[in-house]
Image (cartoon, helix red, strand yellow):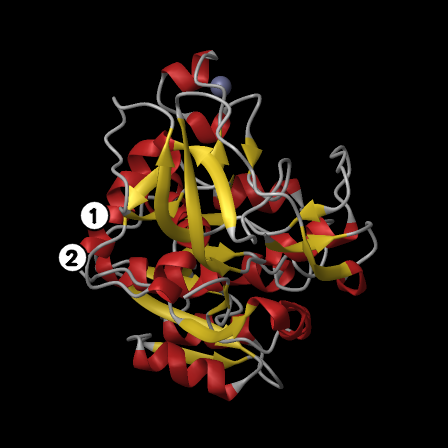
Amino acid sequence: MRALVLDAAGGIDHLRVQELPEPAIQSPGQVLLRVHTVGLNRLDLFVTEGLAGVNYSFPHIMGSDAAGTVVEIGSRESPIRLGDRVMVNPTLSCGNCPLCLQGEDSLCRHLEVLGEHRSGTAAQYLVVPAENLARIPESMPWPQAGAFSLATLTAWRMLTNRVRVQAGETVLIWGIGGGVALAALQIARLLGARTIVTSGENTKLEVAKSLGADVALNHHGVDVAAEIKRLTGGQGVDVIVDSVGAQSWPGSLRSLRRGGRLVVCGATTGPSVSLDLRRLFWHQWNILGSTLGNRREYEEIVKLAGEGKLWPVVDQVVPLEQAVSAYQRLHRGEQVGKLVIEVSQ
Ligand SMILES: [Zn+2]
């Protein structure tokens, strides 16, 4: 089969498409898919650089998200049927630790992600646990399905489980344009919040406005925090969604109201920031981290997708043989929404 692989750590120059043996089902709980589409994630770029503490065996198949057709099933007891159109939740947990048993599988001590800790999805065939699959809503096309899971799940857990956005609150989302930020915008609106988004590019702000963002700020030449204060009567926002990291951190703290919640799910511009503890306790801020989501949360977003309320924005769809160009676009940060590889039709 054809697969997009990383042949060594060191960046996207080490990506290539090559022939690999087809995978086979090893246990009754597994399912074999013929993959149609694979959504890219920023995580993939970190994978190409080589992640600390993760040992890859090269060639490493890329990709965490996927949508495909079921072509073989390990066990007849599975609710999944041959021919089902399914999408893949890339979260792999042990199922046995205390946190898994409480239903908090994204806090599993042995948490792994397809494409990050294990071989990924960007190949013509893929073997995954049946429990990681969800049927694709009938009206949802392959590109949206293949780009759905990781970003939507991450954004959903952040805004519901972690910062618990309430109707009428104001939510600031930095760096609109990425898949998680756009999903966060859609979810904040579903929850009834007022939304403020930022970007350095007007085309991304236009897309955000078309999705219903109340205020879209170009952060070039603008003191975002001062603008936020002006827009919120001097109070600051109730909730901030920040996956930008070092660059946005000072502005985040200046934009957050007393008692406000700041949730972080990424650090694109760098992982190290400073925090004056006196400001933390005086303002009684809640600063939270979030990663992926649990199975119940995945079921919730699949249901919303079925109702047509939470489809990812797709930037471009490229054939497998041109997958590297999609990674270059992601690396340059030019995309608005999800880049998708079409593996087969
Ligand atoms: Zn566990």
In-image side of 245 versus 67 (left or right): right
* Three-letter residue code for mark 2: Glu
Q: Is residue 191 among the parts visible in the rendering?
A: no
Q: Is residue 127 above or below residue 44?
A: above
Q: Are marks 2 and 1 in contact (CB under 8 Å)?
A: yes
Q: Is residue 230 above or below residue 106?
A: below
Give the camera-side residue of 212 and 330. 330
* Three-letter residue code for mark 1: Lys
Q: Residue at x 25, y 22 (%)?
A: 77
Find residue 88 and report its horizontal and vertical position in percent. 41, 44
Kindly report the distance in space between the C-alpha atoms of the residues bearing marks 2 and 1: 6 Å
Find residue 301 and report its horizontal and vertical position in percent. 28, 48
Give the camera-side residue of 214 and 3. 3
Find residue 263 and report its horizontal and vertical position in percent. 48, 48
Image quarter hosting the C terminus: bottom left
Give the camera-side residue of 21 and 98. 21
Q: Residue at x 68, y 72 (%)?
A: 328
Mark 1 C-beta closer than 8 Å to ligand 1: no
Find residue 27 and report its horizontal and vertical position in percent. 46, 21
Query: Which residue corresponds to mark 2?
Result: 307
Mark 2 C-beta closer than 8 Å to ligand 1: no
In-image side of 63 versus 317 (left or right): right
In-image side of 56 versus 298 (left or right): right
Q: Which mark is residue 303?
A: 1
Q: Residue at x 43, y 26 (%)?
A: 105
Q: Residue at x 82, y 50 (%)?
A: 8
* Mark 1 Cα shell of 10 Å, populated few (<14), some (14-19), many (≥20): some
